[in-house]
Amino acid sequence: MAFEKYVEVLSRAELFRGFDKDEVVSMLKCLEPKIKEYGKGNYLAVAGEEFQGIGIMLEGEAAAYKENIAGTRVIMVLLKPGDVFGEIVAFSSQSQWPVTVEAQQPCKALFISRQKIVGECRHLCPWHRKLIENMLMMVSERALTLSRKVEYLSIKSIRGKISTYLLEQYKKTGETTFMLPMNRNELADFLNVSRPSLSREMCSMRDEGIIDFHRASVRIKDLQALKRMAQ
Amino acid sequence: MAFEKYVEVLSRAELFRGFDKDEVVSMLKCLEPKIKEYGKGNYLAVAGEEFQGIGIMLEGEAAAYKENIAGTRVIMVLLKPGDVFGEIVAFSSQSQWPVTVEAQQPCKALFISRQKIVGECRHLCPWHRKLIENMLMMVSERALTLSRKVEYLSIKSIRGKISTYLLEQYKKTGETTFMLPMNRNELADFLNVSRPSLSREMCSMRDEGIIDFHRASVRIKDLQALKRMAQ
DNA sequence: ATCTTTTTGTAACACCAGATACCGACACGC
DNA sequence: GCGTGTCGGTATCTGGTGTTACAAAAAGAT
């Protein structure tokens, strides 16, 4: 198979971090991946269908949807060349795609079965373990992101969410004055609250002298009060 | 070191799944773990402190706490012999304990550094890769659990949560009548709502003829309505 | 059998947060 | 200049949810 075409993309993918291009090629020979092409609107994976493995985007763009029981679709993530999907489920005891992946544009993806990654490698290639380590790192990072998300979602009050968020920014920058990396809409989305409610609460916190802000610039005036509000 | 004492516990630990007792012993020689003892109230790990590795409980019981910025403690999980902690962070780019682990009783734990797990193995022992695979599986399962939690937390209304939960139970058992695996208190905790609110909502769903229940036994009467309520 | 503890349902009330609509500030285009 | 679009703040209203407290039922203990 003509993997050479995609070595450029793959060597930049997280899964092959630490591999040079030659090594990627020899890994691919060992992994025996399947490359598939999709037209716009085609499905790269359908939630609930069987597959034990991972997918890597090669060309084009696809969207990973989650469908709740009522049938409503929620876009989880937009997949671009080099992105991996299905990595969490591939190595757990489950064996079905957790999401539906639909091509937004004509695209190509490469699929590697779980067995080829963790199973016995016939060629005893020395890079195999490095590959599993990379997988381990990717899944760990993913778990960590989810864990942070759970923390924010578990906070009941808007004030608690805002305070926790601002304190995290403070901790990150070390300054009581900093810039928010998103606008109100995005922040509201991130904190899982409505935009007007976020505005209302931020303003009343300003009125109470806890914080001060203008647009994206925020200053913490009363650190102790903020810490008290964080849940 | 006298690992033999703990081989029994360790061979039942998830990390050593698929290893027999001899193999566990030879793995341990290679991993060079450190065994530490703690009195009741001592800390096995303190959130924020440096350590790149994992811990495995050998004896006794410990609690993993999460401390929010305000200082309130929330018990995340109770650790028993064979349980692993710190596995998510060990293999991500972070290098600090995410939780504080406190001994509830006098206890012993074993610590393995990240390097000994993923680093080059001097003895080239054949079980090393199997060990990393086990790690990969454990972290994946953990990520999956977190992902499910995020799904539940993202549902805004109590009805939506209840409906989604009941539909999942229905899907799992294949029966419209089934037993809930937890009591109201635990279910309320799981769905992140207050116990009386959960009761109130379940009862009004019963009044509307959507479900019927008595204690832990639940019967779905109107599947379509339930599906509509799931968000 | 009786007492205690746990579990669950119920009610009243307060209040937080979402929905919606509107306004002002600002940037950008022509 | 003017129109247009985006972004953020504000007001009103309503509904859903937490809190608290108490009662009833069930389970467990002695």
Image (cartoon, coloured by chain):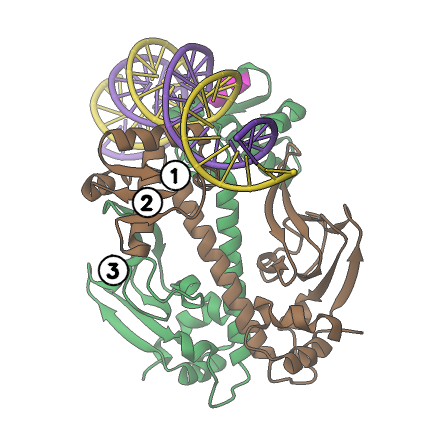
Chain colours: A green, B brown, C purple, D yellow
Magenta span covers which residues?
Answer: A201-206
Marks 2 and 1, how far apart in space? 14 Å
Question: Residue D11 at what x, y percent from top left?
Answer: 36, 9
Q: Of the residues tagged 1 and 3, which is closer to the observer?
A: 1
Neighbor class of circle 2 (other Cα within 10 Å; few <14, some 14-19, many 20+) is: many
Q: Along the line of sight, which residue is nearer the eye, A42 or B140?
A: B140
Relative height, residue B33 to residue B229 (above, below): below
Whether label 2 touches label 3, CB < 8 Å: no
Amino acid type at image mark 1:
Arg
Residue A85: image quadrant is bottom left
Residue denoted by label 3? A103
Tag 1, which chain? B
Between the C-alphas of marks 1 and 3, the distance is 46 Å
Amino acid, disc 3 = Ala
- The correct choice, above or below, for B112 with respect to A19 in the image is above
Q: Secondary structure at mark 3?
A: strand
Q: Residue at label 1?
A: B215
The part of the image, by quadrant, that contains residue A137 is bottom right
| Residue holding disc 2 | B166
- Can the viewer see residue B168 in this picture? no
Image side of residue B204 versus residue B25, left or right: left
Q: Are marks 1 and 3 in contact (CB under 8 Å)?
A: no
